[in-house]
Amino acid sequence: MDFSYAPAPESRSIVDIRSSYGLFIGGEFVDGKGEPFKSINPASEEILADIACADAADVDAAVRAARHAYDTVWGPMPGRERAKYLFRIARIIQERSRELAVLESLDNGKPIRESRDVDLPLVAAHFFYYAGWADKLPYAGFGPDPRPLGVAGQVIPWNFPLLMLAWKIAPALAAGNTVVLKPAETTPLTALLFAEICRQADLPPGVVNIITGAGETGRLLVEHPGVDKVAFTGSTEVGRAIAKAVSGTNKRLTLELGGKAANIVFDDAALDQAVEGVVNGIFFNQGHVCCAGSRLLLQESVAEEFLTALKRRMAHLRVGDPLDKNTDVGAINSAAQLARIRELSLVGEDEGAERWSVPCELPERGFWFAPTIFTGVTQAHRIAREEIFGPVLSVLTFRTPDEAVEKANNTPYGLSAGVWTEKGSRILRIADRLRAGVVWANTFNKFDPASPFGGYKESGYGREGGRHGLEAYLEH
Amino acid sequence: MTLTAEVARSQGALRTFLHGLPGVDQVGAEQRAAMLGTRSIKTTAKAQALDLAIRMVDLTTLEGSDTPGKVRALCAKAVRPDPADATCPSAAAVCVYPAMIRVAAEALRGTGVHLASVATAFPSGQAPLAVKLADTRAAVADGADEIDMVISRGAFLAGRYAEVHDEIAAVKEACGGAHLKVILETGELATLDNVRRASWLAMLAGADFIKTSTGKVQPAATLPVTLVMLEAVRDFRAETGRIVGVKPAGGIRTAKDAIKYLVLVNETAGPDWLDPDLFRFGASTLLNDLLMQRTKLATGRYSGPDYFTLD
């Protein structure tokens, strides 16, 4: 029997989107002096709101507000008091999680199932986790009296807008810093709703400042002399430019950049669960994940069987309306990103890899790309080396564990990796030799606020999350 | 030689085959089942699912206190679950103890509702093979067209796979034309690796259906266990061409639960299994919740339990 699921849309009436948003500086929404831009829903190309753009004077005002709050309120405040604010913010996020999840899906294009079941629970968990550290910093292993750095300038990407905000703001505030944060220009809305939450929580003005704009605003922020600490998550290209700009200054820097993670499946893996893990590894969040398992390394002895199972499973992926509760894969975040995914996919074809896409109907409006795998890929292909940042999986094969490790490590990146085998000793041996900041065993894309996250090589430096994540925001 | 014959030729061959099946990662299987449990089935899809679920119910009474009166009432319920609504389909079957088959056969004659009987020293299976076979033959002779047998979990857990295999094969033969459902009693097998192996063992031995539980052991049917069994029937079909059904039984009480199982079927084994000939629910209280939800969907109002028959 054909069992087709009727549309099950999450109601968007829970969220009230204003027609225009200003900059959040010193606890107030103010107009920006730059040319305003629009944030659109990538699933429909509908305009959601006009967004202010911060110019140099606005960035300066935001940094001054943050400095003032640091000097007068937040810096001197005892950790146990800071903790109360963070706990309060965490609880408000939980209370308003449905609203935030719907807004995130509208602005970003990710399925509501993911924003509801992954992003929002993790966002709240991050604030709860770091709230707990605020009064225990002397016991974090960074000396008896670690001090905050001052003003943190933070620039975050569009793939997990609110979650990346949480990764940046929660540890910074817990450690006693104040922040100026710039969300990505395609996904500013949840950050601006977060600004309202800061007011709801009575957070002192200037402790959190949100400025919106494109790359130029970000550049102004990280280059501002009043910033003591720069934290960036985004592309390796921009990360490199930031590293150059910051060198020779006293600013501390952490970078979370790109990745081209190997997901290694051995012939003794739990096949069905490995298939699930590979699907989750690359198609979670439309593949807009820096730690996505975008290179599948299959042991040759199971390659054919595995690919059959993988394609069968992929055919069940439900691509479409991000607000439909049954959607597995949503919209590509922007026209520019879609163009890049298309371009690299064409390169893959030109280079002779075999392309297979899920046979699914894509909506006419909006930015869409069907989940795709390339087989017959070798290390020499560009699609095996460059980050596509979309729902495209490159499949390579290997014969021995040594070859698997060699291929997995043969990349300029080193953010994450996955190992699939039922043999415990093999997990330990392989994980030990993989040069990646995170190695998942028999799972993928699992996050926890207590677990540090970060990369090797061109994937960046510094760690976010856990006790380690505090270090980037403390003088010691 | 077919896979079935090749594997079944010795204890060693069976063991090698079953232990060579890919393992099951319990955490991963539970996550997959939980994720599918979040599917939101509404409006037309819900109406379709509720009617299908009703058609898949093996309405069951397996109590020491069963009487002819109780069984007749159950049969009437299976034939016309909702006397107030002629569009409501019948249940798939009635499932009773062997002593009740004649009564049920009489009540179900000409209705199209199947008659299933448990057999083989249900629920423990702790009886000599000769007794189990006699139990089966008697049930078929009395009019059961489906037999729900239990495997010897003791023999399975001790690794005596050939013994379990041969016993199932013998019962299958004793069934003649009756359909054989093999109860794995997954609550006693404990691990999902065992569930996968027992599923394959039962299918290799000739099972027409594999069934989770007797309902007498906790936990009974669960989504992860059913997921693994659905993967097994899917893979068995790909390997041999033969299609085997799945029956979760015990603990499925609400329409919401039943719909989760249908989603699991749809996205694991595939839509071919969305058919009462290939998927059943062993349940008693489930039927009334399905009826209540069905009425709610049609009328927009919930009726109280007093508006549905208690049989």
Image (cartoon, coloured by chain):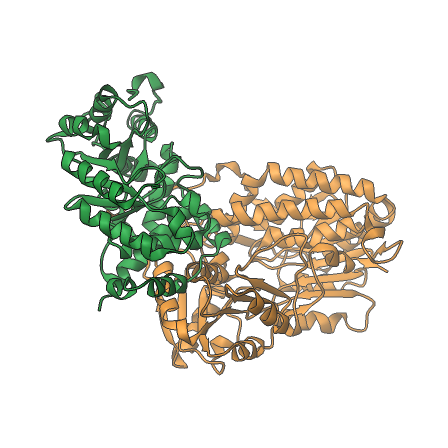
Q: How many marks?
A: 0
Of B36 and A189, nearer the camera is B36
Q: Residue at x 18, y 26 (%)?
A: B103
User: Camera-side residue: B303 or A147?
Assistant: B303
Left-right relation of A172 to A375: right
Q: Position of residue B44 (x, y in %)?
A: 29, 38
Q: Position of residue A254 (x, y in %)?
A: 72, 65
Residue at image position (21%, 49%) is B172
Instruction: Spot the residue most to the left.
Output: B110
Hey, which quadrant is residue A467 in on the image?
bottom right
The colour applied to the residues of chain B in this rendering is green
Up/down of B50 relative to A2, above or below: above
- Please tell me which residue is depicted at 67% across the width and 73% down the height of the picture: A240
Question: Which residue of the protein is positioned furthest toward the bottom in this rendering?
Answer: A380
Q: Is residue B124 above or below residue A169?
A: above
Could you say which is closer to the camera, residue B101 or residue A387? B101
Residue at x 37%, y 61% (from the top left corner): B18
Q: Inspect this view and state whether residue A361 appears.
A: no
Q: Nearer the viewer, residue B128 or B202?
A: B128
Residue A389 visible at all: yes
- Colour orange, chain: A
Location of the C terminus of chain A by quadrant is: bottom right
Residue B69 lies left or right of residue A223; in this view the side is left
Point out residue B169 in the picture as x, y percentages from the top left corner. 24, 52
Quadrant of residue A232 in the image?
bottom right
Residue A176 falls left or right of residue A257: right
Is A352 drawn above or below residue A171 in the view shown?
A: below
Residue B136 horizontal/vertical position (percent): 22, 40
